[in-house]
Image (spheres, grey):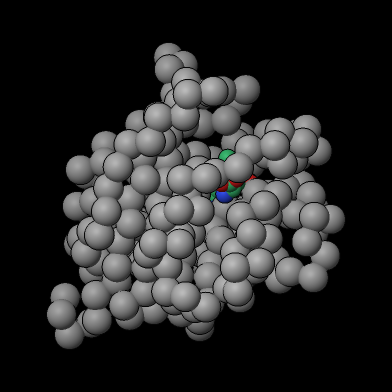
Amino acid sequence: MDLQTISVYDRSAEQIAAQHKMLVPARIYQLVNKFFIKGGVCADVGCGIGRDSAWLSKQGYPVISIDASEGMLQQARQLNPNAYFIQDSLPLLKKQADFSFTNVLCSAVIMHLIDNQIAYAVTNLVRIAAEDGVLIISFRGTKSKDHRENGKLYSVIEVDKLVALFTQAGTTLLHSEIDYQEDRDVEWTNIVLKKLPLLAV
Ligand SMILES: C[S@@+](CC[C@H](N)C(=O)[O-])C[C@H]1O[C@@H](n2cnc3c(N)ncnc32)[C@H](O)[C@@H]1O
């Protein structure tokens, strides 16, 4: 993980929480409704304030919410006192050793990884998914020349290369799109993948 990014999330968790509460990722929720396996256990990797975890719970998904930032997890616990949170980080997701998730959401997280960590992150996101499980991955870039915004890293991720990594890791691409968020002048790349059964890889 990028320690500088996590320390920004830790230090500014309260302020970021106030912003994130106002943002509703409508497109991600549409993708969940279309592609996630109904009622299957979800991992919300990089859950932030747990807004999406709370929404998933309301839709009937059991959710485990994972984040590297203790500050963000504290905010998330306040918002969802009954949810299940784990402090763990990409690229390794070391604490997710024994469990497979039917659905994996990793929204607005992987661009915060250092370049050479992204392939490991892909391997481990696929590892924690169950066979035939579905992964929704969303990321954005930045116009900032040093690839940082308020200290947070936004690595450049080429979607073709990312999809190739996911394919090598044993998934097949179900959907890929660019979603332009007008109010923030930001382009999100959203991809949806399905983990292939081991015999098919
Ligand atoms: C932009 S927020 C996204 C939160 C939420 N998924 C959403 O879409 O609103 C990014 C979150 O990813 C977490 N994060 C950043 N790098 C991470 C890493 N390497 N492993 C796990 N979480 C990470 C941050 O702490 C932060 O809570």
In the displayed structure image, the side of residue 73 where residue 35 appears, left or right: left
Q: Is residue 17 visible?
A: yes
User: Would you place residue 83 above or below residue 32 in this image?
Assistant: below
The quarter holding residue 133 reads: bottom left
Nearest the camera: 110 or 117? 110
**Which residue is pictured at 67% across the width and 52% down the height?**
51
- When the figure is inspected, residue 38 is found, relative to residue 148, above or below; the finding is below
In this view, the residue farthest toward the left is 200
Q: Is residue 108 above or below residue 125?
A: above
Q: Nearer the viewer, residue 77 or 89?
A: 77
Q: Residue at x 64, y 68 (%)?
A: 57
| Numbered marks: total | 0
Residue 89 is left or right of residue 80, and the answer is left
Q: Position of residue 101 (x, y in %)?
A: 47, 75
Relative vertical location of residue 60 with respect to residue 141 in this rendering, above or below: below
Residue 156: image location, x then y, percent: 35, 31
Q: Is residue 99 left or right of residue 19?
A: left
Name the residue rendered at 60%, 68% in the picture. Answer: 59
Foreground: 88 or 65?
A: 65
